[in-house]
Amino acid sequence: MKLISHYPQRELEQVLSSTKDRFTGSYYFTARYSILGAPNPVLRLTAGDIGTVGLPLGEAAAKQIIAHSKQAPFGMGERTLVDKDVRDTWEMDSEFVHFNNPEWELFMNKLAKDVCAGLGVNFYASQPRVELYKLLLYEAGSHFLPHQDTEKVDGMFATMIVILPSAYTGGAAHLSHADLSTTIDCSADSLSSTSVMAWYTDVTHEIKPVTSGYRLALSYNLIHTTSALRPSLPDTRDPLPQLRDIFLAWKQSGYTGPPKVVCLLEHKYSLANLRGSALKGTDAHLVSLLDVVAKELDFCLGLAIVECYASGYGRGDEYEDDYDGLRRSVEFDRDTIETAITNLVDMDGRLISDELDFSVEDEDQTIPSHFSNKIQAGDYYKQEYEGYQGNVRFFLLGVSPY
Ligand SMILES: O=C(O)CCC(=O)C(=O)O
Ligand SMILES: [Fe+2]
C-alpha cells in the first residue's frame, strides 16, 4: 500500500480523467498500399557513391546500401550499444537520405493523418511533425529483440515505419501493450507494395528475423508541435483498485489534507435530476466507481449544485434566441464573482445540506484544479439583464470523509 500525500485530489483527478477519456484509437496502426497506391519516393542516398536507388529494391542496390551503412545500435538506459544478438540491422542516418519526388512528402503528411486517426490522436490539435530518423535495411538474419522506442526528440509520441517495395520473408513485427498484443506481417507482396506501421512510443515491439531477401524501411518520428497535451496512451489499468488506494491512504492518514474534494461533472443536471440514477455518460460511470469505494471505506459521496454569480455591466447587442426570446450576447465587465455550492444531496437525492462551506480558490479541494476558471468560462444558464447579472450554473460531485 502506498501512503500518499495529504492532497488526494490530484491523484483522484488523474485516475478520474484517465477513466473518463473515451479512447477511440488503438496503440498501433498499419496500412498497405499497392504499387499504384503509393508514390515512388525516388530515393537518393548520398552516402558514398550510391545515388538514386531504384524500387523495388534489387540485390545489387541492397549490397551497395549495406556497404555504406553501419550496424544499428539500440538504447539501454542512457547508453547506446551495438550487440548483434539484440539488434542486427543496417542503418543510415537521415542526412544521407533524400526523396526526389515531391509527392513523397505529401504522401507522408497524408499518412501521418491516417496514423493519428488510427492512434486516436487529434491531428489538428497536435499538428505532428513527421521527421525522418533513419533508413533501415534488414537482410537474412536481421532482427531486433523486444524494446520500446526512446523518445529521441521532445514531444515525440509515436514511431512510423514505412517499408518500401522489396522482396523478403520473415521480419514480422510483434507488438504488445498492457495485455494486448498483435503481429504485423508485411512480407506478403512486399515486392510490389509499400507498407506502413506505427505505434505509440511506449508500445513494446520486436522485429522477428528476416529469413530471405531485403526489408528496406524508413523510420520516422511523429512529434507533437503544439501546446495541447502531448498524445499518449491512456492508462489501461482498472481504476477501482487505484481509487481504493487513494481513499484508503486518505483515511489512514487521519484525513489530513482537505476535508472534501469537489469535482465538476461533465453534464448539467436540473435540481429535480440531482440523484445518482439520473447521471449520464461518463458522470454515471465515474460516480458508480466512486460509490463502490465510498461505501467500502465510509466516505460520504454527494451531488450538489455549484452556482457562480458574475455581476457587472452587460454590454452587447440584443438578439432573438429560438428558445428564450430576447437575449443579449454575453459580455460582462465582471466586478464581482461569487461561487456557492448548494443543495448537497446523497445518491438517492435526499438533502444532506442546503449549503456547503466552500472556497473556489482552494485548489486542494477541487477537480479540476482550475475549477474557478472552468466555471467562469461556462455557459450562461440564466442571464438577468435588469440587474446586469449573469448566473452560471454547474453541478458537482462532492466527496467528503465527513
Ligand atoms: O524495422 C522496424 O519495423 C522497426 C525498427 C525499430 O523498432 C526501431 O528502429 O526502433
Ligand atoms: Fe523500435
Image (cartoon, rainbow, N blue to C red):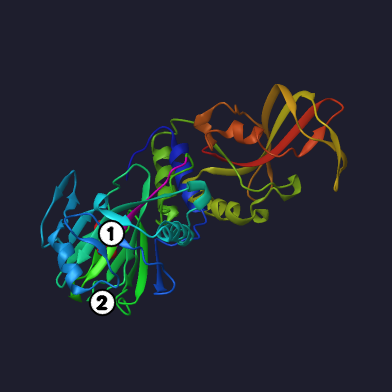
In the drawing, does residue 389 fall left or right of residue 374? right
**Secondary structure under badge 2?**
loop
Which of discs 2 and 1 lies nearer the camera? The answer is: 1
Label 2 C-beta lies within 8 Å of the nearest ligand 1 atom:
no
Which residue occupies the foreground of this view, 64 or 207?
Answer: 64
Question: Crowdedness of circle 1 by 10 Å Cα count: few (<14), some, many (20+)?
Answer: some
On the image, which quarter does residue 136 sit in? Answer: bottom left
The spot of residue 376 in percent (x, y) is 66, 32
Q: Is residue 140 left or right of residue 4?
A: left
Q: Is ligand 1 within 8 Å of the beta carbon of the residue shown at mark 1?
A: no
What residue is drawn where x is 59% and y is 51%?
Answer: 283
Q: Type of residue at label 2? A: Ala
The residue lying toward the viewer, choosing from 354 and 264, is: 264
Which residue was labeled with disc 1?
A: 44
Q: Where is 30 relative to 283, above or below? A: below
- Count of marks overlaid on the render: 2
Label 2 environment density (alpha carbons within 10 Å; few <14, some 14–19, many ≥20): many
Q: Position of residue 185 (x, y in %)?
A: 31, 74
Residue 259 seen in the current view: no
At 71% from the left edge and 38% from the top edge, which residue is drawn?
A: 393
Name the residue that disc number 2 marks. Answer: 167
Inspect the image, locate mark 1, and give the three-letter code of the amino acid beneath it: Arg
In the figure, residue 256 lies in which quadrant? top left
Residue depicted at x 27% and y 55%: 97
Q: Is residue 48 above or below residue 5?
A: below
Residue found at the far bottom of this picture: 188
Q: Is the N terminus in the top left, top right, bottom left or bottom right quadrant?
A: top left
Image x and y of residue 206, in percent: 24, 64
Q: Where's the C terminus, which quadrant? A: top right
The magenta region covers 218-226
Horizontal arrangement in the rendering, residue 166 relative to residue 72 (left or right): right
| Sooner in the amino-acid sequence: mark 2 or mark 1 | 1
